[in-house]
Amino acid sequence: MPYTCPVCGYPHLEEQPHHPGAGGSDEICPSCGTQFGYHDGANDDLVWRTKRHEVLRRKWIAGGMKWHSKVDPVPGDWKPETQLRNIEP
Amino acid sequence: MPGVTIPWSALPPAPPPIVPPPNIPPPQPMLPPSDTPGFDKTFAPQPLPPPVAQPPRNPSLADILAPWIQPPDAEPPPPALPPSETPGLDKAIARINAPTPGFHLTPGLGGFSQPPMWSLPPPPQLLPMPPLPVPPRGGGLGTLGSTLSPIAPAPSPLIRTANGPAAPTMPQPGIGIPETLAQLARRLMPYATEMGAALGRTLPSVGAAGAGAFAAAPFLLMPSNTGSTTIDLGDGLRTSLPPGQRYVPIERRVAPGVFGTDVGAIWKQVPGLYGEVDPGRGVLVDPEQLREALGDEAANRILNTPGIMPMAKPPSDEQLPSLPGNNSASTPEPDNDQEPPKEPPHVDVTNPVSKGKNYAQASKGSSPGHRNSNGWGRPSTLAKHFTDHGADFAATDEEDYARQAQAFRQRALQKGLPTKIDPNGISRIYDPITNIFGAYNANGTTRTFYKPDPALHGYPTNMDYWNAQPGLLQGSP
């Protein structure tokens, strides 16, 4: 079951970004580069993490919404502005 | 005042306007000009552009993104900065705060600007943690004599709540008078019985002997803050039995606890000395290792302890875990792309039968794995982590990066680096000296490996980031 990146809305994460009580998945979002558990906090403080996601999202947008991964190729139909609609503003 | 009306004519006349004398210079800007023109320009008041009538147009990219890039509502303003001695930093800050071309959403905002680093939302648990006494593996009895109260209400360490790890034994207020050893013993007795029963449910080997018999054995069964059960081997030695783990380290008491007891004592792992949990029998130890580490007399005493038996064949180096919670090579399986568990195992705390069983099964389920050549847990992710973090370690290639990650884990064992283990058995290790962080699956394979950076994780310091990591800190002095 794919999961959605809470930062950029990329809809094909392989793992749930965070496990309650057990930290982040350490998966790196190929779209925005967020490593869950590193860039977005380590514990279960949802309020802080939500704000952190907003900060990371603004950074990614300000940086031009570039595809992060140099390992995973950019999907042919990838549209970052459309992808953002996968998350609640 | 209600009912009283003061006519305007009764008010005193307005004071005359204050006219500055000619020798007072006109008001100056509050900030003196610095050496960084860009910085001053950033903070200088910007005149608003006159409104220009624009023809109607289709929604632009900025219109689409507007809901996601609105500035935060309550971000605190950046604090006043003293005159900086680092012009380069000033320029960097000015660059961060500079309006970003292409994101002029609202004319009055002057464009979208990146929030300065100091305006990030404050992370949780920012209070600096003092060097607390390390929680003893005995669990809950750690602090000094005046805080012995957690014994009674502490839940079984084999019971996990649905929301998280085994309930940690937190000091609780209520008893302010030091208890005597007799009182302590009386409080421990029912707990030891409970632990015996729980262990009996968890380990079939012990269960065969019966929970009651186990509780009556000359072991001191104590709750542990690591979710494991501790067995006193005598002679200042003990071992812990984390659920689902086969090889267990043996520890030596290096500092006595309160009144010479194990309460609050400090324990260190005896290098190279392990016990093996043998379902159906008890804990097996290698007599040769034991004699080599402790001498003949102490080794013989331990070998005569009920439930402790000599092991026929000592484990090889590959089989031995390097950290508590690791039994990677004990149950090798062909799958080398082990998926970590998706969710912490659920334990029905209302069902006593399921308490230890589910936790043990869950731990066992997350433990087996195959140690591939470089020790990386999911090979498909290695390239991504190497790309992002390989430069932290000057790694030449993915293999080199993965090898360094495993070497760090081995060093953590030898040096006793701070280690946390979460309910899924994931170990997180941090070396504050070298600022290296590694996360490892329950089977010892690597999840990630990097040098934390406050600019990336958002906590004020790397130690704050480490303190926020989930899991229980493993006992180390």
Image: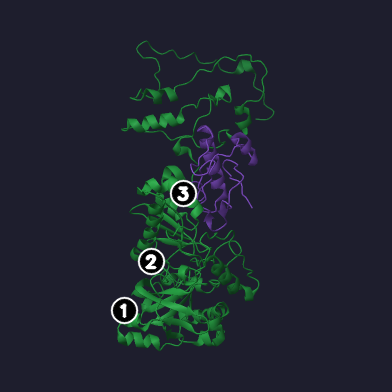
Same-subunit check for callouts 2 and 3: yes
Q: Position of residue B99 (x, y in %)?
A: 49, 26
Task: Name the secondary structure under disc 3.
Answer: helix
Residue nearest the observer in this picture, B123 or A68: A68
Answer left or right for B12 relative to B296.
right
In the rendered view, tell whether residue B88 sits above or below residue B133: above
Residues at marks 2 and 1, CA–CA distance in whole angstroms: 20 Å
Q: Residue furthest bottom?
A: B304
Q: Amino acid at mark 1?
A: Ala
Q: Specify which label sits upstream in the sequence, 2 or 3.
A: 3
Coordinates of residue B361 in the picture (x, y in percent): 58, 71
Q: Do marks 2 and 1 both belong to one polypeptide chain?
A: yes
Q: Colour of chain A?
A: purple
**Image quarter (top left, top right, bottom left or bottom right) of the C terminus of chain A:** top right
Label ID, residue B383: 3
Residue B201, numbered circle: none
Q: Position of residue B185 (x, y in %)?
A: 47, 81
Question: In the image shown, does B332 or B54 lie closer to the viewer?
Answer: B332
Nearer to us in this view, B186 or A75: A75
- Residue B293, numbered label: 1
Instruction: Classify 10 Å Cα crowding around label 1: few (below 14), some (14-19), many (20 and above).
Output: some
Q: Give me the C-alpha separation between circle 2 and circle 3.
A: 34 Å
Question: Would residue A10 be found to the left or right of residue B421 on screen?
Answer: right
Kind of residue at disc 3: Ala
Q: Colour of chain B?
A: green
Circle 3 crowding by C-alpha within 10 Å: few under 14, some 14–19, many from 20 = many
Point 53% across, 24% down: residue: B110
Which residue carries the number 2 mark? B476
Q: Chain of mark 2?
A: B
Task: Identify the secondary structure beneath mark 2.
Answer: loop
Q: Residue B210, how many percent across, how many down?
A: 56, 86
- Judge whether B448 appears above or below A85 on screen: below
